[in-house]
Image (cartoon, rainbow, N blue to C red):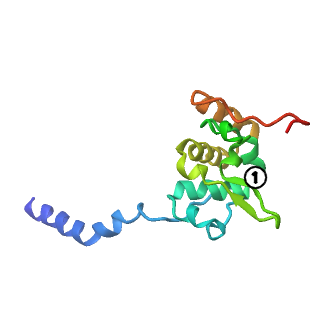
Amino acid sequence: MKRFVTFLFVFSLLFGPFLTGCGGGRTAVSHNHPMAPLEEMPDFVRKTVRKTQESYQFSVANPEIADAIPCYCGCFSLGHTSSYDCYVAGRDESGALLFDDHAQYCSICVDITQGTMQLLDEGKSTAEIFAQIEADYARFSPPTVKPEAGES
């Protein structure tokens, strides 16, 4: 028994650092949908945690999906009309994206986008994703709402 305990101790000293390092780094995550390159994100995005980075990357690469999903963090008061607006503020005169920093501070925005990504990876349709996000987040705040045609 004493040899076994000694063996476990030596094994953990020799191989422990390799085993514990497996989950803590910024490793790439594989998704079944496009992701914008992190290098194309502004500095404030590249300095955030991986979940937030991925949420910005997803929204930029999948604007039609992000724009179809409402946000429930209360950002409708900021003029946001969808989850997409939490990440992208619009375009400048040259057509380059202008990023909104709102989502870097908002865990609800990031969680909604992470949920959207997971459901998309599971093969869910935009309508199914919308319904699930609504069921999960409607208790937090009224949703962002798209203006009716002709409204501004």
| Label 1 SS | helix
Residue identified by numbered label 1: 63
With respect to residue 112, does 43 lie above or below? Answer: below
Q: Residue at x 90, y 36 (%)?
A: 149
With respect to residue 27, does 131 lie above or below? Answer: above
Number of on-image labels: 1
With respect to residue 3, does 90 lie above or below? Answer: above
- Tell me: 43 left or right of 97: left
- x, y (%) of residue 132? 65, 34
Q: Residue at x 66, y 52 (%)?
A: 87
Instruction: Specify whether residue 125 is in view.
Output: no
- Tell me: 7 left or right of 148: left
User: Who is closer to the viewer here, 72 or 92?
Assistant: 92
Instruction: Specify whether residue 147 is in view.
Output: yes
- Residue at the extreme right: 150
Q: Residue at x 60, y 49 (%)?
A: 102
- Tell me: 5 left or right of 33: left
With respect to residue 43, does 109 lie above or below? Answer: above
- x, y (%) of residue 141? 61, 30
- x, y (%) of residue 120? 68, 47
**Quarter of the figure with residue 106:** top right
- Tell me: 146 left or right of 6: right
User: Who is closer to the viewer here, 116 or 104?
Assistant: 104
Q: Residue at x 58, y 67 (%)?
A: 43
- x, y (%) of residue 44? 56, 62
- Say which amino acid is labelled 1: Pro
Quarter of the figure with the C terminus:
top right
User: Who is closer to the viewer here, 102 or 67?
Assistant: 102
Quarter of the figure with the N terminus:
bottom left
